[in-house]
Amino acid sequence: MGIGFGISTSSFDEPTKGNPNPQKFEIIWEENYYDHLILVVKYPDCTNYEGKKILLFDEGVTKKEIVRQGMIDPHFSDNPNYISPIARFVPTKKGLNLAKLLAEHIYER
């Protein structure tokens, strides 16, 4: 995982082995903030940060749409068949605050 282009791969794009398994997840917290969906997702097979990820989704995306696709991959993807997060944050109070700040900043009024 990195900030460079082509570094991160998504299970939506090509199957990968390892953690987190995008088909095994639990949404442990959610909030719609400035029309963006923020989820805290726990991946039981993932070991870093107790398997928790904070994911920010684009405007208008709903939890129902995310759950309906059957998996939540925390990696970024251009695959048009799946909804992918637009940002991911460290699962801490600071990470949640950053997710909210970004959602507010990019909100189209």
Image (tube, rainbow, N blue to C red):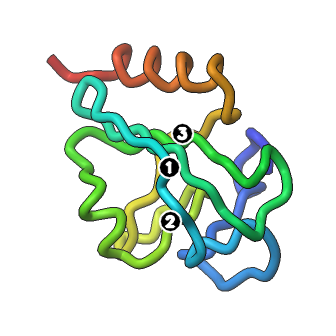
Secondary structure at badge 1 equals strand
| Camera-side mark, 1 or 3 | 1
In three-dimensional space, the C-alpha distance between marks 2 and 3, rounded to whole angstroms, equals 13 Å
Q: Amino acid at mark 3?
A: Ala
Q: Position of residue 24 (x, y in %)?
A: 59, 75
The residue that appears at 72% across and 57% down in the rendered structure is 8
Q: Amino acid at mark 1?
A: Ile
**Along the horizontal axis of the image, is 18 left or right of 13?**
right
Q: Position of residue 109 (x, y in %)?
A: 14, 17
Label 2 CA crowd tier, 10 Å (few <14, some 14–19, many 20+): many
The residue that appears at 78% across and 62% down in the rendered structure is 46
In three-dimensional space, the C-alpha distance between marks 2 and 1, rounded to whole angstroms, equals 13 Å
Give the residue at mark 2: 72
- The image's mark for residue 28 is 1
In three-dimensional space, the C-alpha distance between marks 1 and 3, rounded to whole angstroms, equals 18 Å
Q: Amino acid at mark 2?
A: Ile
Q: Is residue 108 above or below residue 4?
A: above
Looking at the image, is mark 2 or mark 1 earlier in the sequence? 1
Secondary structure at badge 3 equals strand
Q: Is residue 34 above or below residue 77?
A: above
- The image's mark for residue 42 is none
The residue that appears at 53% across and 44% down in the rendered structure is 40
Give the residue at mark 3: 87
Between 108 and 74, the residue placed more toward the observer is 74
Q: Position of residue 39 (x, y in %)?
A: 45, 44
| Camera-side mark, 2 or 1 | 1
